[in-house]
Image: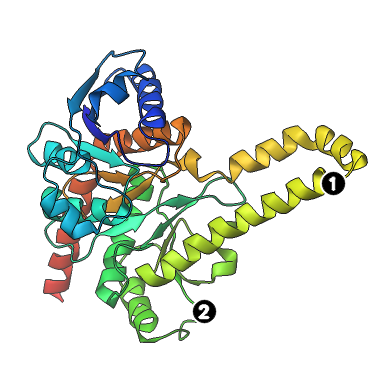
Amino acid sequence: MNIAIDAMGGDHAPKSIVEGTMKAVEAFSDLEISLIGKEEEIRSYLTKNKRISIIHTDTVIEATDEPVRAVRRKKDASMVIMANEVKDGRAEACISAGNTGALMTAGLLIVGRIEGIERPALSPTLPTMDGKGFLLLDVGANVDAKPEHLLQYGIMGSVYAEKVRSIDSPRIGLLNIGTEEKKGNELAKQAFELLKNSGLNFAGNVEARDLLEGVADVVVTDGFSGNIALKTIEGTALSVFGMLKSALTSSLKSKLAAAVLKPQLKEIKQQMDYSEYGGAGLFGLKAPVVKAHGSSDANAIFNAIRQTREMVQKNVPETILKTIEQQKEQKDQI
């Protein structure tokens, strides 16, 4: 299995990318990785080159670049070459921690959509109190959505949760302002009816305050609401840990208490660490495309690679295609 990785994307590239890659090839004997970027910089961190190859390019899509223009004009950018490796069959999946908009554009224009999927969805797995996590989609690939798109998000999320996260009959929740069936705007009301009659294990409406309680294995919403929910969760977690740090270092007594509680606090922080779950999958494309967080360290890159490998092994895009086709056949028969 070959995975192509944009070695120049992210805040800590290429160091964290290379270190995470070396860790992954040591852990998985069936894995080959193509690192794409500035060869001299990559080699300065590459201490093991077993099953790791480099495709050199000096061109990089920056975080400030306009996504569509950058993908179309920077044909030799590391992210564009990465996507073409998948398109041309030399790699089975790809990963980047770079410009999110550019990655979505490269995925759509180069890798291509699964037939029957109208809108791909960007989908991270977020932590829950019980440590199991939940998949949230969409978090920004599409700001606007139709009820049919939310149904497709539910189908794609269910396939991923079952195949990759090994959850039998995953519970699908619809993000809403209340749990009652008739709550929400017209998008939510119509999506509720579609999901209820879809054959999925639909758990009904879920509220944002309950997301971290694990009320659903997959939560679907439009990209606008999903991105706000994601950023709110991230911001709240950072603020809480920041307040705890300030409180536990404010006096000698607090520092002594912190020393006693350090193992438990470390365990809580790890449990709530997004990087343990991998990256955000861009579901609905012909091959796995994964967006790692821009601030990913080596461990986050390793988990993104692990996640991508499992998506390839479990044939997630092919299963999504078959499920969409079955849904269409059932709809035509009604």
Query: Which residue does the image show at 47% across and 67% down from the upper left?
Result: 228
Q: Which residue, given by chain and number where applicable, does mark 2 sit on?
A: 177
Query: Which residue does the image show at 41% across and 30% down from the upper left?
Result: 16
Q: Position of residue 276 (x, y in %)?
A: 49, 39
Q: Earlier in the sequence, mark 2 or mark 1?
A: 2
How far apart marks 2 and 1 lie (CA) works out to 39 Å
Indicate the quadrant where residue 166 lies. top left
Observer able to see residue 173: no
Indicate the quadrant where residue 116 lies. bottom left
Residue 250 — which label?
1
200 over 159 or under it: above or below: below
| Circle 2 residues within 10 Å: few <14, some 14–19, many ≥20 | some
In the image, which is nearer the foreground, mark 2 or mark 1? 1
Locate the C terminus by quadrant. bottom left
- On screen, residue 36 versus residue 264, left or right, reads left
Q: Amino acid at mark 1?
A: Ser
Residue 329 — which label?
none
> What colouring style does the render use?
rainbow
Q: Amino acid at mark 2?
A: Ile
Give the number of marks. Answer: 2
Query: Which residue does the image show at 34% across and 18% down from the upper left?
Result: 46
Observer able to see residue 93: yes
